[in-house]
Amino acid sequence: MVKATLVASLGAAVFAYAVCILVALAVWAFAAHGDSRVDDALRAGSFAFLALHGSPFEIGDARFSLPLLGLTLIPIVLLSRALGRAWRRKPIAGHVEMLTVASLGVAPYLLFALGVSLFWSSSDAGVPLISSLAWVLLIACAAAGVAWWQVVRTSPLANVPAPQPALGTRRVLAGAMIVLLIMFSFALLIVFVSLLANLSRMGEVLTSLDSGVLGVLLLLALGFGWLPAMLTWAVAYMLGPGFALGQETAVTPFGVSFGELPSLPWFAAVPTSSGGWYLVLLVIPMLAGLSASAVLRGSLNRSGLSKWWRESLTSVLIAAIALWAIGWLTRGSLGAGRLSEFGAQPMSLFLACCLLVGAGASCLPLFEWLKNRWHSRVRT
């Protein structure tokens, strides 16, 4: 089991790295690379491998730290599948052994990334070692968690019972998931409509770049990688705090100020005005809270109105904490100076979620409380 886990982890890392190197060499071979050497292509492939895990990197004074969260699915899938195949070969005695083999599955992957970071970093281009390793560790742990869950849920060889949280905990978590699902579903709709409405502007930016087929494919990959960030920014827009695109650009439903932006097609879809129907979007978080409260209404029949209200607000709090974490993960920079601040403020997301979603979640319990008060007065 130990040997199979080590081999699977290292194999997944080597495979992902090899794919990144081959892609970088292909781009270097077919593009007009000028005076660049093959070493530059290998370094770019190494940085691409680390960027797949959300790692930042630096070129001169410019820091590129806006994580490509959408592309982290690639290493998560590769590592989780490799570990899952290894762990299904023998029965696992219990949670302690599972934790041990999971740690062994993460260690080789992390050491390989450390070697890549140290070998290819130089004085003019490199990766912040601590940040890079933290991101790789996060992705590797997520992959190990996915593999563990698949094994304990599907493999007859695993002697590890899946955890079963209490009914109240499951209900509260379900309420939080409903809140997040509704808000991110509307965020996806907003992003899609914005991109569709600004296709001509995006086409003009793409034409001005004159990037060719390889450039278009690279832009599509970047767009998919930054899709979670764009969805989070759309949620921040719905909640009210909005988001920043550099130090001089702020986008909220109450006002928009524009500064210098990178020449990337999807930035052409950013709203250029505020007010009017944009303010209607503030209703969506309240509807999300209202929906979660309606799902949790069963608490009223079991333990009374106070439990229903408490479960609803607890779901909102969990969703707000999740939004804070997502907002922190989707912040970063795309260069130096004015391009050093991209994303939403995590604490603003947390507070706005507590306020708007909490208000929506309180509507049904408050209405039920007022109805009960009215009926008690009528009886007296």
Image (cartoon, rainbow, N blue to C red):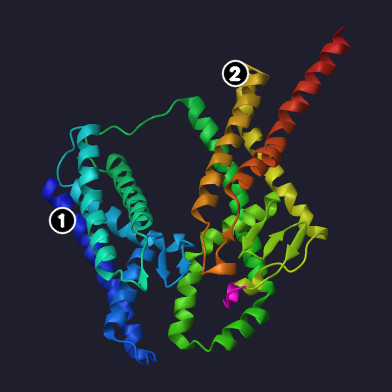
Can you give x and y, in whole percent of width and height, for residue 313 in the image?
Answer: 63, 31
Where is residue 86? Give x, y as percent: 18, 50
What residue range appears in magenta?
261-266
Question: Overall secondary structure of the magenta stretch?
Answer: loop
Residue behind mark 1: 7
Q: CA distance from mark 2 to mark 1?
A: 52 Å
Per the image, the residue denoted by label 2 is 302
- 96 in the magenta segment: no
10 Å crowding of disc 1: few (<14), some (14-19), many (20+) = some
Q: Is residue 224 left or right of residue 372?
A: left
Relative height, residue 27 to residue 262 (above, below): below
Residue at (64% x, 53% y) in the render:
236
Asked if the residue under mark 1 is in contact with the one under mark 2, i.e. CB atoms within 8 Å, the reply is: no
Q: Disc 2 marks which amino acid?
A: Arg
State the quadrant of the C terminus. top right
Q: Specify the quadrant of the image occupied by residue 360.
A: top right
Rendered view: 224 above or below 366:
below
Camera-side residue of 226 and 148: 226
Between 50 and 373, the residue placed more toward the observer is 50
Q: Of the residues shown, which amino acid type is indicated by label 1?
A: Val
Determine if residue 186 is in view. no
Q: Secondary structure at mark 2?
A: helix
Magenta stretch containing residue 263, yes or no? yes
Q: Quadrant of the N terminus?
A: top left
Q: Is 315 situated left or right of 216 in this image?
A: right
- Is residue 85 visible in the rendered image? The answer is yes
Residue ID at (45%, 63%): 68
Q: Position of residue 345 (x, y in %)?
A: 60, 51
